[in-house]
Image: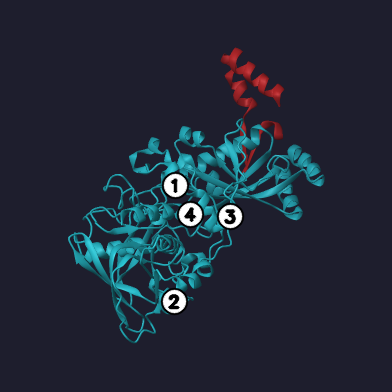
Chain colours: A red, B cyan
Amino acid sequence: MLRRDFVKRIISIFLLPYAFSEIKLSKTYYESGWILKDQDF
Amino acid sequence: MLIDLQLSKHKTDFSEFDFLIVGAGVAGTILAKNLASSGKKIALIEGGSSEYTESSQNLYKGKVIGDPYFDLDVTRLRFFGGSSNHWTGMCRSFEKVDFERKYLGNIYQWPIKFNDIDKYKKKACEILEIPSEFDDNIDSTYKIKSIGFNMSTVNFKEKYFQEFILDKNISLFINANLTKFNGKNRQIKSINFESFNGNKIKLITKKVIIATGGIENCRILLWMDKIYPNLFFEKNLPIGKYWMEHPHFTLGKAIVDRRKVSKTYYSLKGDIQKKLGILNFGLRINHLDEKNTTELIRDLICVAPRLGNKLAKLAGKNLVCGAVLRAAWEQSPSINSKISLSKELDSFGIPRVDLHWKKNELDRATLKKSIMVFNEWLLNNDFGRLNLYDWVSRDKSYPSDDQLGGHHHMGGTRMHESKNYGVVDSNCKVYGSNNLYIAGSSLFTTGGHNNPTLPIVQLTLRLSDHLREKI
């Protein structure tokens, strides 16, 4: 958990032009009513 | 002394009362008890009997217009003890943030401070026979907190009926329905009452308190305003307006980590409510049994096999379980949500009520934003996953076959520093009147998200302190 947060923070601070990566990392999916993360699949 | 007007064949003369309290529900009985204990001469008037009767309950019939709601003769009880004869006993008070709503506009602002009623919490809890400490768990790292309710088993009829009959300072009238106000120059001198079989009585008093519940308080004042315009209080007060409930709906299901989501009730912290520009919101998590949990996980496996299979293993170890998410939240005081007089009259010639209950955009925003904060808490910490019903996630209409409300009737004669937005001042006195007061949940400027009984008791204790000093 901590490591993932750290990676997200690094991405958002140092890789601003690649902000899409940040969005992808925390992307939320609505599937049949479920609110899920990309890691869940 | 007990006077059943239905049985009273002869006229009894009563000298002037210090206080005449109309309505013997939670607020009326507590007022009577407190004022009588300080030596005041009290007339406590109950329109119904000591038991449920059809003839009394019939007077509560009315029309529901607007959002679907309970029949008005089902959502309340008209006999001694009032709705405490069928309440669930759930108690929790207002929270500090409920008195800090200026960010939503002046209309939301109570004319009193949180401490003005919080100081009555301990005594109110003693009356309700519950602990005054509540099982709240506030973790500073999260935006939500778990909250506790205390359960009261007090029935106000059982608690006070016999005691009041023996109290030399209380004259308890039952089956006495108000039919006429007498007086002039913004001062009520006496009130006429009538039983269901036509017995009549006129009672003289120094001060009057209407404590007939969150719908009936509006009805009586609207009726007075109609037939005695400007005689007892100011014209053009917003009587019946800003009427509120606590919307109660099931939002969906969830699979949660039992160790992390172990409590039943959650709400958003005050500073988060302010930041999001929303009102108070209570979420109830009803844990499901093994069979229903298995079904829910099976549903999840169809969508997210990796997570679903992982959770299935954890469920086998009793570490995760399914849950139903139910919400009860604060409704904004809106001028479009109101009580008005019907054209139909009851058996005493008084107009019945039409209830126009209307939820608005802020009520919906409170629901949506709050459930998203809860979702964020589950998702980011891996405490669980939500499965929201379509009407919540796709912003469809509220379902009409859900619980709808909490039978909590609030506002309509609300307290506000401006008579444009309120009917009573900070001392519960009707604007422009010399001696007419209101008690009960119709006083609420805003409703919070918790059950109203404990705050009703607190406000009533505050009112009785004020009245004792004034006379």
Q: Position of residue B254 (x, y in %)?
A: 66, 45
Q: Which mark is residue B49?
A: 2
Q: Who comes first in sequence, dot 1 or dot 2?
A: 2
Label 2 or label 4, whichever lies nearer to me, is: 2
Label 4 or label 3, whichever lies nearer to me, is: 3
Give the Cα distance between marks 4 and 3.
Answer: 15 Å
Q: B110 or B64, which is in the foreground?
A: B110
Q: Who comes first in sequence, dot 2 or dot 3?
A: 2
Residue occupying the point 41% across, 79% down: B55
Residue B317 higher or lower than B24, as above or below = above
Name the residue carrying label 3.
B130
Does any portion of residue B342 appear in the rendered image?
yes
Give the Cα distance between marks 3 and 1.
Answer: 17 Å
Query: Numbered disc 3: what chain?
Result: B
Name the residue carrying label 1.
B117
Asked if badges 4 and 3 are on one and the same chain, I answer yes
Residue occupying the point 38% across, 48% down: B445
Q: Which amino acid type is shown beneath numbered disc 1?
A: Ile
Query: Numbered disc 1: what chain?
Result: B
Q: Who comes first in sequence, dot 3 or dot 1?
A: 1
Label 1 or label 2, whichever lies nearer to me, is: 1
Task: Classify residue B433 by image quadrant.
Answer: bottom left
Residue occupying the point 40% across, 80% down: B4
Q: Who comes first in sequence, dot 2 or dot 4?
A: 2
Q: Which mark is residue B452?
A: 4
Label 2 or label 3, whichever lies nearer to me, is: 3
Looking at the rendered image, the quarter that the C terminus of chain B falls into is bottom left
Residue extending furthest bottom? B9
Q: Who comes first in sequence, dot 4 or dot 3?
A: 3
